[in-house]
Image (tube, rainbow, N blue to C red):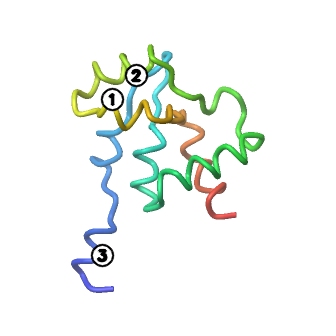
Amino acid sequence: MNSRESQKNTVTDEMIMNRIYVLRGQKVMIDIDLAVLYQIDVAKMRMLTGKKTGRFPDDFMFRLNLEDYDSLKRQDSTVNRNTLLTDFPFAFTDLCKALHNSVYVS
C-alpha cells in the first residue's frame, strides 16, 4: 500500500467527531457513517445488523423514525432525506460503536 492509499484509508478523530449526533438523549452514529468508516456497503451492513440484533442489547442501537430524522436534520443540514428515508437507518450508541466491530469481524 502506498502512502496515498494509506492516507485515504486513515480514519481521523475529526471524521468520527463530525458524525456523532445526539438522538433520544444519547450520542450516536448512524449506520451510513459507520459503513463509510468500515469501508463496507451500507446495504450489507444493515443486513448483517438485522441478522445479529440479538448480539446488541436494546439500548445499544435503535432504528430512526421521523422524529429522529428531524432532529438529525437540525444537527446536520447536509443530511439527505431521500437517502435516509428509503430505509430508516440504525443509530448506534457510544458503547455499541466500541463493540460494533466484533459483529463484522466474526
Left/right placement of residue 10 relative to residue 64 reads left
Q: Are marks 2 and 1 in contact (CB under 8 Å)?
A: yes
Q: Which mark is residue 81?
A: 1
Q: Residues within 10 Å of mark 3 (few under 14, many from 20)?
A: few
Left/right placement of residue 27 relative to residue 57 reads left
Q: Which residue is mark 2?
A: 69
Instruction: Name the residue at 72% across, 33% down.
Output: 57
Instruction: Name the residue at 66% across, 55% down.
Output: 103
Q: Secondary structure at mark 1?
A: helix
Task: Measure how far apart labels 1 and 3 are at the Cα level.
Answer: 32 Å
Q: Residues within 10 Å of mark 2 (few under 14, many from 20)?
A: some
Instruction: Name the residue at 32% across, 65% down.
Output: 10
**First reached walking from the N terminus: tag 2 or tag 1:** 2
Task: Measure how far apart labels 3 and 2 are at the Cα level.
Answer: 34 Å
Viewer-closest of 68 and 26: 68
Residue 33 locus on image (x, y percent): 40, 45
Amino acid type at image mark 3 = Ser
Viewer-closest of 83 and 69: 83
Left/right placement of residue 17 relative to residue 44 reads left
Which one is in front in this view, the residue at disc 2 or the one at disc 1? 1
Q: Quadrant of residue 105?
A: bottom right
Task: Measure how far apart labels 2 and 1 are at the Cα level.
Answer: 8 Å
Quarter of the figure with the C terminus: bottom right
Image: 42 above or below 23: below
Q: Are marks 3 and 2 in contact (CB under 8 Å)?
A: no
Residue 66 locus on image (x, y percent): 45, 17
Q: How many marks?
A: 3
Image: 103 above or below 22: below
Instruction: Name the residue at 46% across, 28% down.
Output: 27
Which one is in front in this view, the residue at disc 1 or the one at disc 3? 1
Q: Which residue is mark 3?
A: 6
